[in-house]
Protein backbone atom coordinates (compact mmCIF):
# COMPACT_ATOMS: atom_id res chain seq x y z
CA UNK A 1 0.00 0.00 0.00
CA UNK A 2 0.90 3.64 -0.45
CA UNK A 3 2.21 5.74 2.42
CA UNK A 4 -0.09 8.19 4.20
CA UNK A 5 0.75 11.64 2.90
CA UNK A 6 -0.29 15.27 2.90
CA UNK A 7 -0.90 15.02 -0.82
CA UNK A 8 -4.21 13.29 -0.08
CA UNK A 9 -6.37 16.32 0.55
CA UNK A 10 -8.94 15.80 3.23
CA UNK A 11 -6.84 13.13 4.94
CA UNK A 12 -5.71 13.52 8.52
CA UNK A 13 -2.13 13.76 7.23
CA UNK A 14 -3.11 16.78 5.14
CA UNK A 15 -4.91 18.38 8.05
CA UNK A 16 -1.96 17.75 10.35
CA UNK A 17 0.57 19.35 8.02
CA UNK A 18 -1.74 22.21 7.15
CA UNK A 19 -3.05 23.10 10.60
CA UNK A 20 -1.59 21.14 13.49
CA UNK A 21 2.13 21.31 12.74
CA UNK A 22 2.17 25.10 12.16
CA UNK A 23 0.28 25.50 15.43
CA UNK A 24 2.84 23.36 17.26
CA UNK A 25 5.67 25.40 15.72
CA UNK A 26 4.02 28.67 16.71
CA UNK A 27 3.69 27.46 20.26
CA UNK A 28 7.38 26.45 20.31
CA UNK A 29 8.36 29.90 19.02
CA UNK A 30 6.23 31.53 21.73
CA UNK A 31 8.02 29.50 24.38
CA UNK A 32 11.41 30.51 23.02
CA UNK A 33 10.18 34.09 22.90
CA UNK A 34 9.83 34.00 26.64
CA UNK A 35 13.58 33.24 26.86
CA UNK A 36 14.36 36.64 25.34
CA UNK A 37 14.86 38.51 28.58
CA UNK A 38 16.82 35.64 30.16
CA UNK A 39 19.18 35.52 27.20
CA UNK A 40 19.56 39.31 27.06
CA UNK A 41 20.31 39.53 30.80
CA UNK A 42 22.72 36.63 30.81
CA UNK A 43 24.53 37.16 27.52
CA UNK A 44 23.78 40.75 26.48
CA UNK A 45 23.85 41.66 22.78
CA UNK A 46 25.18 38.21 21.93
CA UNK A 47 22.23 36.56 23.64
CA UNK A 48 19.76 38.77 21.78
CA UNK A 49 21.34 38.01 18.42
CA UNK A 50 21.22 34.31 19.17
CA UNK A 51 17.59 34.60 20.16
CA UNK A 52 16.68 36.49 16.95
CA UNK A 53 18.50 33.98 14.77
CA UNK A 54 16.75 31.04 16.41
CA UNK A 55 13.27 32.54 16.22
CA UNK A 56 13.93 33.59 12.62
CA UNK A 57 14.97 30.06 11.64
CA UNK A 58 11.90 28.51 13.22
CA UNK A 59 9.61 31.04 11.54
CA UNK A 60 11.25 30.21 8.23
CA UNK A 61 10.67 26.53 8.88
CA UNK A 62 6.98 27.21 9.50
CA UNK A 63 6.70 29.26 6.32
CA UNK A 64 8.41 26.57 4.23
CA UNK A 65 6.21 23.87 5.67
CA UNK A 66 3.02 25.79 5.01
CA UNK A 67 3.99 26.63 1.45
CA UNK A 68 5.18 23.13 0.53
CA UNK A 69 8.81 24.15 -0.07
CA UNK A 70 11.52 21.48 -0.33
CA UNK A 71 12.95 20.13 2.89
CA UNK A 72 16.69 20.30 3.38
CA UNK A 73 19.76 18.41 4.55
CA UNK A 74 20.82 18.64 8.17
CA UNK A 75 24.09 20.25 9.15
CA UNK A 76 24.36 19.99 12.92
CA UNK A 77 26.82 17.73 14.72
CA UNK A 78 24.44 15.10 16.03
CA UNK A 79 25.39 11.49 15.23
CA UNK A 80 22.17 10.84 13.25
CA UNK A 81 22.77 13.54 10.60
CA UNK A 82 24.22 11.13 8.07
CA UNK A 83 21.21 8.82 8.34
CA UNK A 84 18.75 11.67 7.87
CA UNK A 85 20.62 12.95 4.85
CA UNK A 86 20.79 9.48 3.29
CA UNK A 87 17.04 9.24 3.77
CA UNK A 88 16.63 12.59 2.01
CA UNK A 89 18.72 11.38 -0.94
CA UNK A 90 16.75 8.16 -1.22
CA UNK A 91 13.45 10.04 -1.23
CA UNK A 92 14.81 12.41 -3.84
CA UNK A 93 15.91 9.53 -6.02
CA UNK A 94 12.58 7.72 -5.63
CA UNK A 95 10.47 10.74 -6.52
CA UNK A 96 12.84 12.45 -8.91
CA UNK A 97 12.64 15.70 -6.93
CA UNK A 98 13.56 17.18 -3.57
CA UNK A 99 11.23 15.98 -0.81
CA UNK A 100 8.53 18.55 0.01
CA UNK A 101 6.30 18.90 3.03
CA UNK A 102 2.92 18.04 1.52
CA UNK A 103 4.08 15.73 -1.24
CA UNK A 104 6.23 13.26 0.68
CA UNK A 105 5.31 10.58 3.20
CA UNK A 106 3.61 12.09 6.26
CA UNK A 107 5.73 10.05 8.68
CA UNK A 108 8.96 11.40 7.19
CA UNK A 109 7.95 15.05 7.04
CA UNK A 110 6.42 15.08 10.50
CA UNK A 111 9.51 13.47 12.06
CA UNK A 112 11.65 15.92 10.11
CA UNK A 113 9.86 18.90 11.61
CA UNK A 114 10.84 17.83 15.14
CA UNK A 115 14.37 17.00 14.03
CA UNK A 116 14.60 20.37 12.34
CA UNK A 117 13.53 22.16 15.54
CA UNK A 118 16.27 20.23 17.31
CA UNK A 119 18.78 21.33 14.67
CA UNK A 120 17.79 24.97 15.00
CA UNK A 121 18.40 24.81 18.73
CA UNK A 122 21.62 22.81 18.31
CA UNK A 123 22.94 25.51 15.97
CA UNK A 124 22.17 28.26 18.47
CA UNK A 125 24.75 29.42 20.96
CA UNK A 126 22.75 29.45 24.18
CA UNK A 127 19.71 27.27 23.54
CA UNK A 128 21.45 24.05 22.56
CA UNK A 129 19.74 21.89 25.17
CA UNK A 130 16.55 23.88 25.43
CA UNK A 131 13.38 21.77 25.26
CA UNK A 132 10.65 23.99 23.74
CA UNK A 133 7.95 21.56 24.94
CA UNK A 134 9.15 21.16 28.51
CA UNK A 135 6.80 23.78 29.95
CA UNK A 136 3.77 22.09 28.37
CA UNK A 137 4.81 18.63 29.55
CA UNK A 138 5.40 19.81 33.09
CA UNK A 139 2.19 21.72 33.32
CA UNK A 140 0.20 18.69 32.04
CA UNK A 141 1.83 16.53 34.73
CA UNK A 142 1.01 19.03 37.46
CA UNK A 143 -2.60 19.33 36.26
CA UNK A 144 -3.04 15.53 36.45
CA UNK A 145 -2.21 15.23 40.14
CA UNK A 146 -5.66 13.97 41.22
CA UNK A 147 -5.83 11.07 38.73
CA UNK A 148 -2.17 10.31 39.46
CA UNK A 149 -2.95 9.90 43.16
CA UNK A 150 -6.01 7.74 42.29
CA UNK A 151 -3.82 5.49 40.18
CA UNK A 152 -1.09 5.27 42.85
CA UNK A 153 -3.66 4.25 45.47
CA UNK A 154 -5.12 1.66 43.15
CA UNK A 155 -1.68 0.19 42.51
CA UNK A 156 -0.95 0.07 46.23
CA UNK A 157 -4.27 -1.61 46.87
CA UNK A 158 -3.78 -4.37 44.33
CA UNK A 159 -0.15 -5.11 45.07
CA UNK A 160 -0.77 -5.34 48.79
CA UNK A 161 -3.91 -7.43 48.54
CA UNK A 162 -2.96 -9.70 45.69
CA UNK A 163 -0.39 -11.90 47.36
CA UNK A 164 -2.93 -14.44 48.54
CA UNK A 165 -5.51 -14.03 45.85
CA UNK A 166 -6.38 -16.51 43.16
CA UNK A 167 -5.19 -16.41 39.57
CA UNK A 168 -8.50 -15.10 38.20
CA UNK A 169 -8.33 -11.99 40.33
CA UNK A 170 -4.72 -11.41 39.39
CA UNK A 171 -5.70 -11.69 35.73
CA UNK A 172 -8.43 -9.10 36.26
CA UNK A 173 -5.96 -6.72 37.91
CA UNK A 174 -3.54 -7.29 35.04
CA UNK A 175 -6.25 -6.34 32.57
CA UNK A 176 -6.98 -3.16 34.50
CA UNK A 177 -3.32 -2.15 34.63
CA UNK A 178 -2.98 -2.69 30.87
CA UNK A 179 -6.12 -0.64 30.21
CA UNK A 180 -4.91 2.16 32.48
CA UNK A 181 -1.63 2.31 30.60
CA UNK A 182 -3.53 2.14 27.28
CA UNK A 183 -5.94 5.00 27.96
CA UNK A 184 -3.13 7.14 29.33
CA UNK A 185 -2.23 7.49 25.65
CA UNK A 186 -5.19 9.79 25.10
CA UNK A 187 -3.21 12.54 26.80
CA UNK A 188 -0.65 13.54 24.21
CA UNK A 189 0.06 17.14 23.43
CA UNK A 190 0.57 16.61 19.72
CA UNK A 191 -3.00 15.58 18.89
CA UNK A 192 -4.18 18.73 20.64
CA UNK A 193 -1.81 20.80 18.50
CA UNK A 194 0.04 21.87 21.62
CA UNK A 195 -3.11 22.95 23.46
CA UNK A 196 -3.75 21.82 26.98
CA UNK A 197 -4.57 18.11 27.18
CA UNK A 198 -4.28 16.23 30.42
CA UNK A 199 -6.08 13.49 32.32
CA UNK A 200 -9.19 14.96 33.88
CA UNK A 201 -11.48 11.97 34.38
CA UNK A 202 -11.05 9.45 37.18
CA UNK A 203 -8.87 6.85 35.41
CA UNK A 204 -10.55 3.92 37.18
CA UNK A 205 -14.11 5.04 36.80
CA UNK A 206 -13.70 5.52 33.07
CA UNK A 207 -12.50 1.95 32.41
CA UNK A 208 -15.90 0.24 32.03
CA UNK A 209 -17.22 3.06 29.93
CA UNK A 210 -14.21 2.89 27.58
CA UNK A 211 -14.18 -0.92 27.22
CA UNK A 212 -16.41 -1.00 24.08
CA UNK A 213 -13.99 1.37 22.35
CA UNK A 214 -11.16 -1.17 22.37
CA UNK A 215 -11.52 -2.45 18.82
CA UNK A 216 -8.94 -5.22 19.13
CA UNK A 217 -8.39 -6.57 22.60
CA UNK A 218 -5.61 -9.12 22.93
CA UNK A 219 -4.97 -8.52 26.63
CA UNK A 220 -5.84 -12.16 27.37
CA UNK A 221 -3.14 -13.32 24.94
CA UNK A 222 -0.61 -11.01 26.56
CA UNK A 223 -1.58 -12.41 29.94
CA UNK A 224 -1.21 -16.05 28.84
CA UNK A 225 2.15 -15.26 27.30
CA UNK A 226 3.48 -13.53 30.41
CA UNK A 227 2.18 -16.27 32.71
CA UNK A 228 3.85 -18.97 30.68
CA UNK A 229 7.12 -16.97 30.53
CA UNK A 230 7.05 -16.41 34.27
CA UNK A 231 6.43 -20.12 34.91
CA UNK A 232 9.11 -21.22 32.52
CA UNK A 233 11.72 -18.74 33.74
CA UNK A 234 10.76 -18.65 37.42
CA UNK A 235 9.78 -15.02 37.10
CA UNK A 236 13.15 -13.96 35.57
CA UNK A 237 11.41 -12.18 32.69
CA UNK A 238 12.45 -8.97 30.97
CA UNK A 239 9.85 -6.51 29.77
CA UNK A 240 10.66 -3.55 27.52
CA UNK A 241 8.43 -0.50 27.22
CA UNK A 242 8.97 1.82 24.28
CA UNK A 243 7.67 4.88 26.06
CA UNK A 244 5.43 7.50 24.55
CA UNK A 245 4.17 10.62 26.32
CA UNK A 246 5.37 12.11 29.58
CA UNK A 247 2.84 13.14 32.26
CA UNK A 248 -0.08 10.91 33.17
CA UNK A 249 0.77 8.35 30.49
CA UNK A 250 4.32 7.88 31.74
CA UNK A 251 3.08 7.57 35.31
CA UNK A 252 0.60 4.86 34.20
CA UNK A 253 3.36 3.01 32.35
CA UNK A 254 5.58 3.05 35.43
CA UNK A 255 2.68 1.76 37.54
CA UNK A 256 2.18 -1.05 35.03
CA UNK A 257 5.89 -1.87 35.26
CA UNK A 258 5.73 -1.84 39.07
CA UNK A 259 2.70 -4.15 38.98
CA UNK A 260 4.53 -6.67 36.78
CA UNK A 261 7.52 -6.66 39.12
CA UNK A 262 5.50 -7.06 42.29
CA UNK A 263 3.32 -9.82 40.84
CA UNK A 264 6.36 -11.85 39.77
CA UNK A 265 5.56 -11.44 36.07
CA UNK A 266 8.84 -9.61 35.41
CA UNK A 267 12.19 -9.22 37.11
CA UNK A 268 13.46 -6.27 35.08
CA UNK A 269 11.88 -3.53 32.98
CA UNK A 270 13.75 -1.65 30.27
CA UNK A 271 12.29 1.78 29.56
CA UNK A 272 13.11 3.40 26.22
CA UNK A 273 12.98 7.20 26.12
CA UNK A 274 13.53 9.69 23.28
CA UNK A 275 16.93 11.25 22.72
CA UNK A 276 15.47 14.68 21.88
CA UNK A 277 12.22 16.66 22.28
CA UNK A 278 9.77 14.72 20.12
CA UNK A 279 6.12 14.98 19.03
CA UNK A 280 5.61 17.57 21.77
CA UNK A 281 5.01 15.31 24.73
CA UNK A 282 7.19 12.23 24.20
CA UNK A 283 9.30 11.27 27.21
CA UNK A 284 12.95 12.29 27.13
CA UNK A 285 15.42 11.11 29.80
CA UNK A 286 15.16 14.57 31.29
CA UNK A 287 11.35 14.20 31.61
CA UNK A 288 11.81 10.80 33.20
CA UNK A 289 14.18 12.07 35.92
CA UNK A 290 12.07 15.17 36.50
CA UNK A 291 8.96 12.99 36.98
CA UNK A 292 10.72 10.76 39.51
CA UNK A 293 11.99 13.80 41.41
CA UNK A 294 8.53 15.41 41.46
CA UNK A 295 7.03 12.21 42.79
CA UNK A 296 9.69 11.82 45.44
CA UNK A 297 9.25 15.41 46.60
CA UNK A 298 5.44 15.10 46.67
CA UNK A 299 3.47 15.80 49.85
CA UNK A 300 1.46 12.72 49.10
CA UNK A 301 3.07 9.80 50.95
CA UNK A 302 2.21 7.23 48.33
CA UNK A 303 3.61 9.25 45.42
CA UNK A 304 6.72 10.04 47.40
CA UNK A 305 7.29 6.34 48.19
CA UNK A 306 6.84 5.44 44.52
CA UNK A 307 9.36 8.13 43.50
CA UNK A 308 11.91 6.75 45.98
CA UNK A 309 11.18 3.18 44.96
CA UNK A 310 11.65 3.88 41.24
CA UNK A 311 14.94 5.69 41.88
CA UNK A 312 16.00 2.57 43.76
CA UNK A 313 14.89 0.33 40.87
CA UNK A 314 17.28 2.23 38.64
CA UNK A 315 20.12 1.86 41.15
CA UNK A 316 19.64 -1.86 41.64
CA UNK A 317 19.06 -2.45 37.92
CA UNK A 318 15.45 -3.53 38.07
CA UNK A 319 14.57 -0.55 35.89
CA UNK A 320 16.85 0.40 33.01
CA UNK A 321 16.44 3.77 31.31
CA UNK A 322 17.64 3.65 27.72
CA UNK A 323 17.65 5.93 24.72
CA UNK A 324 18.65 5.38 21.13
CA UNK A 325 18.68 7.70 18.13
CA UNK A 326 16.71 5.14 16.15
CA UNK A 327 13.50 6.10 17.96
CA UNK A 328 13.78 9.63 16.56
CA UNK A 329 14.54 8.66 12.97
CA UNK A 330 11.83 8.63 10.27
CA UNK A 331 12.33 4.94 9.48
CA UNK A 332 9.72 2.31 10.08
CA UNK A 333 10.50 -0.53 12.47
CA UNK A 334 10.89 -3.15 9.75
CA UNK A 335 14.18 -1.32 9.09
CA UNK A 336 15.36 -1.42 12.69
CA UNK A 337 17.45 -4.57 12.31
CA UNK A 338 19.50 -3.10 9.45
CA UNK A 339 19.65 0.46 10.78
CA UNK A 340 20.34 -0.20 14.45
CA UNK A 341 21.65 -3.78 14.82
CA UNK A 342 22.71 -3.31 18.44
CA UNK A 343 19.31 -2.03 19.47
CA UNK A 344 17.70 -4.93 17.62
CA UNK A 345 19.91 -7.39 19.43
CA UNK A 346 19.11 -5.76 22.76
CA UNK A 347 15.35 -5.94 22.13
CA UNK A 348 15.72 -9.58 21.13
CA UNK A 349 16.64 -10.38 24.74
CA UNK A 350 13.20 -9.22 25.88
CA UNK A 351 10.29 -11.48 26.80
CA UNK A 352 7.80 -8.82 25.76
CA UNK A 353 8.28 -5.47 24.05
CA UNK A 354 5.40 -3.08 24.75
CA UNK A 355 5.04 -0.26 22.22
CA UNK A 356 3.08 2.68 23.52
CA UNK A 357 1.02 5.05 21.44
CA UNK A 358 0.09 6.20 18.01
CA UNK A 359 3.45 7.11 16.54
CA UNK A 360 4.92 3.74 17.52
CA UNK A 361 1.95 2.12 15.77
CA UNK A 362 2.55 4.14 12.64
CA UNK A 363 6.20 3.09 12.62
CA UNK A 364 5.37 -0.55 13.35
CA UNK A 365 3.04 -0.68 10.36
CA UNK A 366 5.13 1.57 8.10
CA UNK A 367 2.41 4.28 8.09
CA UNK A 368 0.85 2.70 5.00
CA UNK A 369 -2.74 2.74 3.83
CA UNK A 370 -3.40 -0.88 4.78
CA UNK A 371 -6.86 -2.39 4.34
CA UNK A 372 -8.25 -2.48 7.88
CA UNK A 373 -8.56 -6.25 7.88
CA UNK A 374 -4.84 -6.79 7.18
CA UNK A 375 -3.46 -9.15 9.86
CA UNK A 376 -1.32 -7.26 12.38
CA UNK A 377 1.64 -9.56 11.74
CA UNK A 378 1.55 -8.81 7.99
CA UNK A 379 1.65 -5.07 8.67
CA UNK A 380 4.76 -5.62 10.84
CA UNK A 381 6.58 -6.67 7.64
CA UNK A 382 8.91 -9.06 9.40
CA UNK A 383 9.71 -6.91 12.43
CA UNK A 384 9.69 -9.39 15.29
CA UNK A 385 12.72 -9.00 17.54
CA UNK A 386 10.74 -10.56 20.41
CA UNK A 387 7.10 -11.10 21.40
CA UNK A 388 5.51 -7.69 21.10
CA UNK A 389 2.36 -5.76 21.77
CA UNK A 390 1.09 -2.29 21.11
CA UNK A 391 -1.17 -0.20 23.36
CA UNK A 392 -2.47 2.59 21.17
CA UNK A 393 -5.33 5.04 20.98
CA UNK A 394 -6.12 5.82 17.33
CA UNK A 395 -4.86 9.23 16.21
CA UNK A 396 -3.97 8.61 12.57
CA UNK A 397 -6.00 7.28 9.66
CA UNK A 398 -4.44 3.86 9.87
CA UNK A 399 -5.47 0.66 11.59
CA UNK A 400 -5.04 -3.06 10.89
CA UNK A 401 -6.24 -6.32 12.39
CA UNK A 402 -9.97 -5.47 12.40
CA UNK A 403 -12.75 -7.95 11.64
CA UNK A 404 -14.70 -7.47 8.43
CA UNK A 405 -17.26 -4.70 8.99
CA UNK A 406 -15.79 -3.47 12.28
CA UNK A 407 -14.63 -0.25 10.65
CA UNK A 408 -18.15 0.50 9.41
CA UNK A 409 -19.56 -0.05 12.88
CA UNK A 410 -16.98 2.28 14.41
CA UNK A 411 -17.71 4.88 11.73
CA UNK A 412 -21.38 4.74 12.64
CA UNK A 413 -20.52 5.44 16.26
CA UNK A 414 -18.23 8.37 15.43
CA UNK A 415 -17.11 9.64 12.06
CA UNK A 416 -13.71 10.66 13.50
CA UNK A 417 -13.10 7.25 15.08
CA UNK A 418 -9.62 6.87 13.55
CA UNK A 419 -8.17 10.17 14.69
CA UNK A 420 -9.93 11.31 17.86
CA UNK A 421 -7.98 9.16 20.35
CA UNK A 422 -11.29 7.80 21.62
CA UNK A 423 -10.88 4.33 20.10
CA UNK A 424 -8.03 1.98 20.87
CA UNK A 425 -6.33 -1.30 20.03
CA UNK A 426 -4.27 -3.72 22.09
CA UNK A 427 -2.52 -5.97 19.59
CA UNK A 428 -0.11 -8.74 20.45
CA UNK A 429 2.03 -11.10 18.46
CA UNK A 430 4.36 -13.91 19.40
CA UNK A 431 6.09 -16.06 16.84
CA UNK A 432 5.25 -19.72 17.20
CA UNK A 433 8.94 -20.59 17.14
CA UNK A 434 9.60 -18.37 20.16
O1 LIG B 1 0.50 14.42 14.79
C1 LIG B 1 0.66 13.19 14.31
C2 LIG B 1 0.63 12.10 15.31
O2 LIG B 1 1.33 10.96 14.96
C3 LIG B 1 -0.78 11.74 15.52
O3 LIG B 1 -1.14 10.73 14.71
C4 LIG B 1 -0.82 11.56 17.00
O4 LIG B 1 -1.81 12.37 17.42
C5 LIG B 1 0.44 12.13 17.57
O5 LIG B 1 1.17 12.55 16.51
C6 LIG B 1 1.27 11.22 18.37
O6 LIG B 1 0.53 10.40 19.18
P1 LIG B 1 1.23 9.51 20.27
O7 LIG B 1 1.70 10.39 21.34
O8 LIG B 1 0.15 8.58 20.72
O9 LIG B 1 2.34 8.75 19.60
MG1 LIG C 1 3.69 10.95 21.73
Image (cartoon, rainbow, N blue to C red):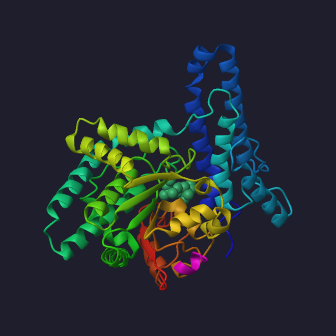
How many numbered marks does the figure carry? 0
315 or 332, nearer to the observer: 315
> Measured along the vertical axis of the image, is residue 196 above or below residue 153?
above
Residue 327 visible in this rendered orientation of the protein: yes
What residue is shown at x 37% (from left), y 68% (from top)? 237
275 or 72, nearer to the observer: 275
- From the viewer's perspective, is 286 left or right of 66? left
> Measured along the vertical axis of the image, is residue 141 above or below residue 17?
above
Q: Position of residue 395 (x, y in %)?
A: 50, 61
36 or 103, nearer to the observer: 36
Q: Position of residue 175 (x, y in %)?
A: 29, 69
134 or 337, nearer to the observer: 337
What residue is shown at x 46% (from left), y 79% (from top)? 430
User: Image quarter for residue 173?
Assistant: bottom left
Q: Position of residue 74 (x, y in %)?
A: 75, 46
- From the viewer's perspective, is 93 left or right of 63? right
Residue 70: within the magenta? no
Q: What stretch is highlighted in magenta?
A: 377-382
Residue 191 visible in this rendered orientation of the protein: no
What residue is shown at x 62% (from left), y 73% (from top)? 369
Amino acid sequence: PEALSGRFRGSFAYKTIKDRLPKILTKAVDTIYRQRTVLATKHGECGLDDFKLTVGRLSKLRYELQTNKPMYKLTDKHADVELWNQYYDKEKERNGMDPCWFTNAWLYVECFMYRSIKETLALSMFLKDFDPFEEQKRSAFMSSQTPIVTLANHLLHIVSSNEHRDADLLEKDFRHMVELSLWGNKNDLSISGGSENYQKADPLEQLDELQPYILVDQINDMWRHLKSCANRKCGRCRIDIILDNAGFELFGDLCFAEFLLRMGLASEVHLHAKAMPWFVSDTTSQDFWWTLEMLQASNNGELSRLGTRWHQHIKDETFFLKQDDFWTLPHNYAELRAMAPQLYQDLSASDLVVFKGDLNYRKLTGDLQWPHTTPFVDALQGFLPAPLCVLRTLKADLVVGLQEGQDKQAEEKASDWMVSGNFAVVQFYVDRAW
